[in-house]
Image: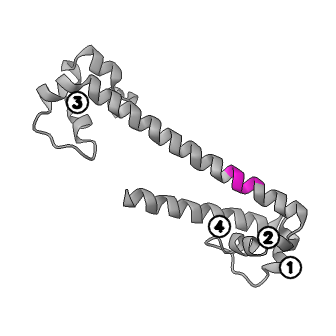
């Protein structure tokens, strides 16, 4: 969980930094950046933070662009969250479908870090049809 949080924060900082660097060079916020953020060093989201701090003073074109960027960022974040939940649901379904196979082949394998899935993969030929069908594609493919 801690790793996921740190990766998310890193991604946010990287994304904001990349957007800011592009914004500095061109776009509807270029003049606002020159006016309000000229002394701000590019990187780690500093330009975006500067723009947010000066939001009431920004041109309407820049405000619109900032809103679009935030909306796009939030949509991407929501999509990642949904995909994560979908993967979690598929794993849960697979584990339920493979309950008997897990008991038969992987009884002494502790949970965590994909150990149970690896065990099922090792016994792939011997698994029940229900379990084979429920397993994630990459496990079935042998990756």
Q: Residue furthest front?
A: 56
Q: Residues within 10 Å of mark 4 (few under 14, many from 20)?
A: some
Q: Secondary structure at mark 1?
A: helix
Q: Residues within 10 Å of mark 1 (few under 14, many from 20)?
A: few
Residue 121 image offset from top left, x and y in percent:
25, 30
| Labels 4 and 2: the sequence-earlier one | 4
Circle 3 — which element?
helix
Side of 26 where 2 appears, left or right: left
Magenta stretch in the rendered image:
68-72
Q: CA distance from mark 3 to mark 4?
A: 42 Å
In the picture provided, is 11 more to the left or to the right than 3?
Answer: right
Secondary structure under tag 4 reads helix
Residue at x 20%, y 34% (from the top left corner): 119
Q: Which residue lies under the disc numbered 4? A: 17
Q: Which mark is residue 120?
A: 3
Q: Which residue is mark 1?
A: 35
Residue 71, magenta (yes or no): yes
Would you identify the image quadrant in which residue 90 lies? top left
The label shown at residue 55 is 2
- Tell me the quadrant of the picture where the C terminus can be found: top left
Q: CA distance from mark 1 to mark 4?
A: 19 Å
Compare marks 2 and 1 and give the one earlier in the sequence: 1
């Amino acid at each position: 969980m801690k790793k996921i949080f740190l990766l998310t924060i890193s991604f946010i900082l990287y994304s904001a930094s990349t957007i800011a660097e592009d914004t500095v060079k061109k776009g509807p916020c270029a003049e606002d950046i020159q006016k309000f953020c000229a002394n701000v060093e590019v990187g780690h989201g500093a330009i975006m933070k500067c723009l947010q701090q000066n939001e009431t003073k920004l041109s309407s074109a820049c405000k619109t662009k900032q809103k679009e960027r935030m909306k796009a960022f939030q949509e991407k974040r929501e999509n990642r969250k949904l995909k994560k939940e979908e993967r979690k649901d598929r794993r849960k379904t697979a584990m339920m479908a493979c309950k008997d196979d897990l008991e038969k082949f992987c009884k002494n394998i502790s949970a965590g870090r994909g150990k149970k899935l690896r065990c099922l993969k090792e016994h792939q030929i011997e698994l029940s049809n229900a379990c084979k069908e429920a397993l994630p594609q990459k496990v079935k493919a042998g990756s």
